[in-house]
Every structure is written in structure tokens, then in C-alpha cells.
Image (spheres, grey):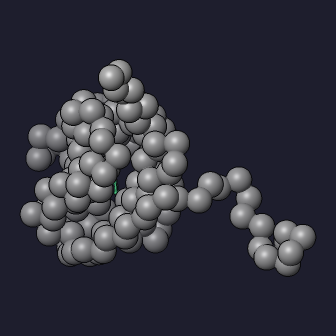
Amino acid sequence: MNNDGTKARRGRKRAQNEVRLIFPSHSVNESYARSAAAVFVSQINPTLTELSDIKCAVSEAVTNCIVHGYRDTLGTIYITMRLYENREFRIEIKDKGCGIPNITEAMQPLYTTDKENERSGMGFTIMENFMDSLKVSSGKSGTKVVMSKKLAPLPTVIK
Ligand SMILES: Nc1ncnc2c1ncn2[C@@H]1O[C@H](COP(=O)(O)OP(=O)(O)OP(=O)(O)O)[C@@H](O)[C@H]1O
Ligand SMILES: [Mg+2]
């Protein structure tokens, strides 16, 4: 509790902007989510490389919800995106699907449970490499992926 009686918010800084998306796991919505993330982050002028890294990572995480989390069923995907004053972008992508029994194993490069569809098992590796941080939590009630990336400072214009 703070001195003025309000609830203390431990450690977490306040977001400058935040959006939430909730949509069904139709495969066409993967490109919607990827583009929505790109449009959201564009307000702070990312470089083309930063933009393409974020689109790729979001695409991998959302595809995983669709093809693994909900497999042959239709479910709901929940996304929260935030921007902070230090130019940090954070995104949380969540499903209420089957969950991952062993996260450490699932995050190994080339590990896949879906060989028949010729998946390469590189989704988590791509997310890890294209973003600054990746956290995965999973259980019987589904899977949550949280990723962040701090964008480079804007170039100063010399007049
Ligand atoms: N949201 C999820 N729900 C359930 N299982 C998942 C989820 N995301 C990932 N997994 C499991 O983790 C494994 C590894 O995921 P990863 O994205 O690295 O590879 P992949 O999806 O199998 O292949 P690729 O992403 O290269 O097409 C998957 O094969 C799947 O077993
Ligand atoms: Mg994948």
C-alpha cells in the first residue's frame, strides 16, 4: 500500500499506450494479428528491421495458438500490446488450448510435435532471436507467450 492509501504497483512501469485484441483462431486471423501489431508499433517509428522482426515473432506465436493450442478445434486468441516511454514494445499472446506439457523441450530448436505437416520446430527460436525477451507459461488451461523488444532511439535531425 502507498502512503496515500492507493495500491502499490510493484516494479511494473505504466504503459504509454495499450490495445487488446480478442479474435477466433481462424488461420486467416494470423495475418490480421501480424498487421495489427505492425500498425500499433508504427506510432513510434520503428526501423524496417524492427518492424519485420516483430511481425515475424507475432506471426509465429499466433500460428502456434492456431495449429497447436487449438489444433482441429476453434478457440479464442487474446492479445495485449503495450508501448512504454522508453520505446519498449511488449506483447502478450494467449490461448486457452491444450497447453505444452514440457516447455523446455518445446523451446529447443527443431523440436516439433507436428512432423506430418512438415513443421520445422523453429517458431520459438525465431521469437527468441527476433525479440529481446521471450517468456512462455503453459498449463492445462492454455499457453501464454510474453515478448518484448526495445526499439532503437530515434535519430536526431541535425539542422
Ligand atoms: N500455443 C501452443 N499450444 C500448445 N503447444 C504448443 C503451442 N506453441 C507451441 N507448442 C508446442 O511447441 C512445439 C514447438 O513450437 P515451435 O513453434 O518452436 O515449432 P513448430 O510450431 O512445431 O514448428 P514451426 O513453428 O517451425 O512451424 C510445437 O510443435 C508444439 O508441440
Ligand atoms: Mg510454431
Is residue 151 or residue 59 the one in the foreground? Answer: 151
Residue lying at 18% horizontally and 55% vertically, measured from the top left: 35
- Residue 144 picture location, percent across and down: 44, 59
Q: Is residue 47 above or below residue 117?
A: above
What residue do we see at 52% from left, 59% from top?
15
Is 6 on the left or on the right of 54, as rendered? Answer: right
Query: Residue 54 is drawn in which quadrant?
Result: top left
| Residue 145, percent from left and from top | 43, 53
Q: In this picture, is 13 found above or below 130?
A: below
139, 83: nearer the viewer = 83
Q: Is residue 20 visible?
A: yes
Task: List x then y, in percent, for residue 92.
Answer: 42, 58
Residue 70 location, quadrant:
bottom left
Is residue 99 visible in the rendered image? The answer is no
Whole-percent x, y for residue 103 in the image: 47, 46
Residue drawn 31% across the image and 51% down it:
43
Front position in the image: 63 or 141:
63
Q: Is residue 48 left or right of residue 61?
A: left
Image quadrant where one finds the N terminus? bottom right
Q: Residue at x 35, y 21 (%)?
A: 158
Q: Quadrant of the C terminus?
A: top left
Relative height, residue 146 to residue 120 (above, below): below
Which of 102 and 39 lies nearest the eye of the viewer? 39
| Residue farthest along the bottom direction in this orientation | 5
Total tally of numbered discs in the picture: 0
Residue farthest toward the top in the current orientation of the protein: 158
